Amino acid sequence: MFQKLKSIDEESIDADDPKDRTNYAKRFPLAKCEEIVKASLKNAKVKSEKITDENRQKFWQALGTLRREAAKRVVYKLSPKALVPMNTGDRQHESCSAAQLRRGSKTVFYAPGCEATLVDDQREFFREVDGDDGDFVQGRVVVEKSVDFKTPANLVIADATPERKFVRELTGRENALKIDSWLKNTPMGFYSVEYAWKRGNKPKRGEFSPDFLIKQGEQVFVVEVKGDEEIGDPSADNVKKHEYATEHFKRLNEWLAKEHIPSRYQFNMISPKSYNVFFQKLRDGGLAAFRSELDVVMAGADNAEG
């Protein structure tokens, strides 16, 4: 009951009119709620002092009649506690099947010398993938020069067409010259961003892992890649990912500034339609403050919802 009261207060805390902001939890603290429950049980002549499921439902239903001046959505506010260094050496391993490479639904990128970094039981299969006339030509891309493969991973697996095109750009000579390093994030478990959204009428919370981190000087560009179809019809899930990731890196930059650390992070959600502009600005040193067409759409969709 007390948590329910707190939830109502949190929903109304941003109301424009102070009269619409409730303070039920202050008026009915936990001890007060306990007193009400005990008195109610006594009045109902419940001598066992135990609450049945039926009793519990009645208590909850009673709270449902509380008058709320305005309907509000729950807004999760995250408060950073500390900067936590992350080492790319701790990034989880990724894998894919021979079938996925054979049909080209996944693509593996690697540079000369990759085989020497693999353990013995991986090398035989790698030689099959590396063969120019084998079954895996559609599922592999050999970066011509190791110096252009500026990632700490010995090979990179791209999941779909937008990712494959993006990695091709990252490993292209003219772009590689302008990048200090980059990392393809794992789908889960390494660097993730917490976010909240609604599925139907039910609030949900989860995490997502942005696809790429690109370092250029003191600037780190964090990129989530989507298909062009999101421009015309953005999904509610991706709108919230964009909103929470933007706020996440804003808070991170504020913390870095407070700690006098020069690094700064920028989040972009982009689709292949914006790749040319993105990499042109990266080469020109003008990527800071860049917003893709998808960024604009996602931000507009979030403002419309809010």
Image (spheres, helix red, strand yellow):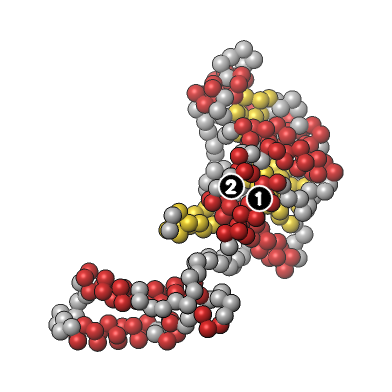
Q: Residue 142: where, in percent of width, then height?
A: 68, 25
Local SS, label 2: loop
- The residue tagged 1 is 297
31 or 43: nearer the viewer: 43
Q: Residue 41: where, in percent of width, then height?
A: 21, 82
Q: Would residue 60 appear left or right of 117 to someone viewing this image?
A: left
Q: Residue 231: where, in percent of width, then height?
A: 64, 44
Residue type for callout 2: Pro
Q: CA distance from mark 2 to mark 1?
A: 8 Å
198 or 158: nearer the viewer: 198
Q: Earlier in the sequence, mark 2 or mark 1?
A: 2
Q: State which quadrant residue 51 falls in.
A: bottom left
Residue that sits furthest to the top in the current view: 133
Q: State which quadrant residue 253 falls in.
A: bottom right
Point 79% across, 43% down: residue:
282
Residue 86 in view (yes/no): no
Local SS, label 1: helix
Q: For the residues labelled 2 and 1, say whether their Cβ atoms are less than 8 Å apart.
A: yes
Q: Is the N terminus in the top left, top right, bottom left or bottom right quadrant? A: bottom left
Residue 200 in view (yes/no): yes
**Circle number at residue 234:** 2
Point 72% across, 68% down: residue:
258
Q: Is the C terminus in the top left, top right, bottom left or bottom right quadrant? A: bottom right
**Circle number at residue 279:** none
| Label 2 neighbour load within 10 Å: few <14, some 14-19, many 20+ | some
Q: Is residue 252 above or below residue 59?
A: above
Q: Residue 106: where, in percent of width, then height?
A: 56, 29
| Label 1 neighbour load within 10 Å: few <14, some 14-19, many 20+ | some
Point 79% across, 48% down: residue:
287
